[in-house]
Amino acid sequence: MRNAISGLGLAALTATVLGMGATGARAVDISGAGATFPYPIYAKWADAYKKETGVGMNYQSIGSGGGIKQIKAKTVTFGATDAPLTGKDLDESGLTQFPAVMGGIVPVVNLDGVKPDELVIDGPTLAKIFLEEIKTWNDPAIQKLNPSVKLPSQAIAIVHRSDGSGTTYNFAYYLADVSADWKSKVGVNTALQWPAGIGAKGNEGVANNVAQTKGAIGYVEYAYAKQNKLTFTKMINKDGKPVSPTSEAFQAAAANADWKSQPGYGVILANQPGEKSWPMTAATWILIYKQPQDTAATTEALKFFAWSYKNGGKMAEELDYVPMPTNVVADIEKTWSGEIKDSGGKPLFTN
């Protein structure tokens, strides 16, 4: 799957791996759109699910902003977003929201002679780079964090998302938490007024641009960094410890999350305490109507995500995502039973 994702174009992969719909007379097409952050694992789950059940899924990896627009326009069965909707927005839209999986956002660089997991960056320095206050790789602030790394005098080429992106939301949320300047000058949103840099669409676009641009830095979901063999960095976490992006580090950040504390389980995992925690850990959410127009397709979508919770953990870990904890899954499935119903008030999902 990793080779397939890095070697195929997005449109081709959507058609070949996820399938354009279910097969057989009784099967129902599942359609989804949104976040690029979880796309590799959704693709892997969908491939395995179709082989097991005959039911296919067409997922458009178009960014969280696009996914929110499509579900609100009722053109897909479910939307996917890495930036959770507020309780007010969920209520006004008639939507329910639940997390599907967790992962990590990593800085990626293109520097000759620098290997993956060799360069160390902290949050304030990362903010200054993306604010274009640090402009060259041998800047004293970067060199201080990396005394044993020979850094070039090369100009830093910033690559960021150009589309509405939950990955951007989580990245900006973290930077705002560690940098007062970032919070006041740029802020937190799915789409930002970037001070500088090259815009690219999707995690795929950022990964490709960094890979092709010497001196570049960008931010992507960890699976994209690995699949595209990009040079990812270590980071200094909230406890002041240098950590590598690993499944264990993502799990450490998520360990103390209180998922019930926010409407729609909308907990942001950025900058969590713990000496092993990765500072840019994030969840990704699914949006489904509480009273959907196409009850058959929504029922199939819920079956798919129930299957992924039960059977998809190992596949998620193979791509360095973190499965949702069992107790949280139990709460989510209770939410489905209590909130997602047909026009007659009958639940579409029962355990």
Image (cartoon, helix red, strand yellow):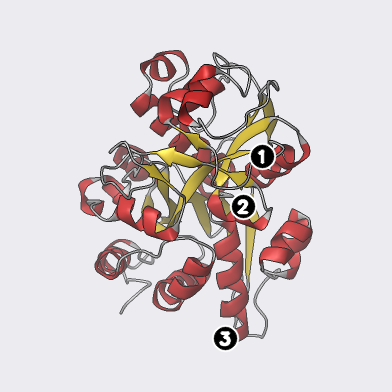
Tag 3 and tag 1, C-beta contact below 8 Å = no
What mark, if any, has residue 93 been given in the picture?
A: none
Reading the image, the residue beneath label 3 is 52
Tag 2 and tag 1, C-beta contact below 8 Å = yes
Q: CA distance from mark 2 to mark 1?
A: 9 Å
Q: Looking at the image, tell me whether mark 3 or mark 1 is earlier in sequence order.
A: 3
Residue 347's spot in the image, x, y percent?
Answer: 32, 71
Mark 2 closeness class: few <14, some 14–19, many ≥20 residues within 10 Å:
many
Amino acid of disc 1:
Val
Q: Is residue 341 left or right of residue 138?
A: left
Quarter holding the C terminus? bottom left
Instruction: Tell me which corner region of the image, top left, top right, bottom left or bottom right, holds residue 210.
Output: top right
Residue 85's spot in the image, x, y percent?
Answer: 39, 42
* SS label for mark 1: helix
Q: CA distance from mark 3 to mark 1?
A: 34 Å
Reading the image, the residue beneath label 1 is 206
Mark 1 closeness class: few <14, some 14–19, many ≥20 residues within 10 Å:
many
Which residue occupies the extreme front position in the image? 148
Q: CA distance from mark 2 to mark 3?
A: 26 Å
Quarter holding the N terminus? bottom right
For the residue pair 274 and 201, the one nearer the viewer reads as 274
For the residue pair 311 and 65, the one nearer the viewer reads as 311
Q: Is residue 54 left or right of residue 20?
A: left
* SS label for mark 2: helix
For the residue pair 233 and 225, the one nearer the viewer reads as 233
Residue 301's spot in the image, x, y percent?
Answer: 49, 69
Instruction: Tell me which corner region of the image, top left, top right, bottom left or bottom right, holds residue 118.
Output: top right
Q: Looking at the image, tell me whether mark 2 or mark 1 is earlier in sequence order.
A: 1
Amino acid of disc 3:
Glu
For the residue pair 78 and 312, the one nearer the viewer reads as 312
Reading the image, the residue beneath label 2 is 224
Amino acid of disc 2:
Tyr
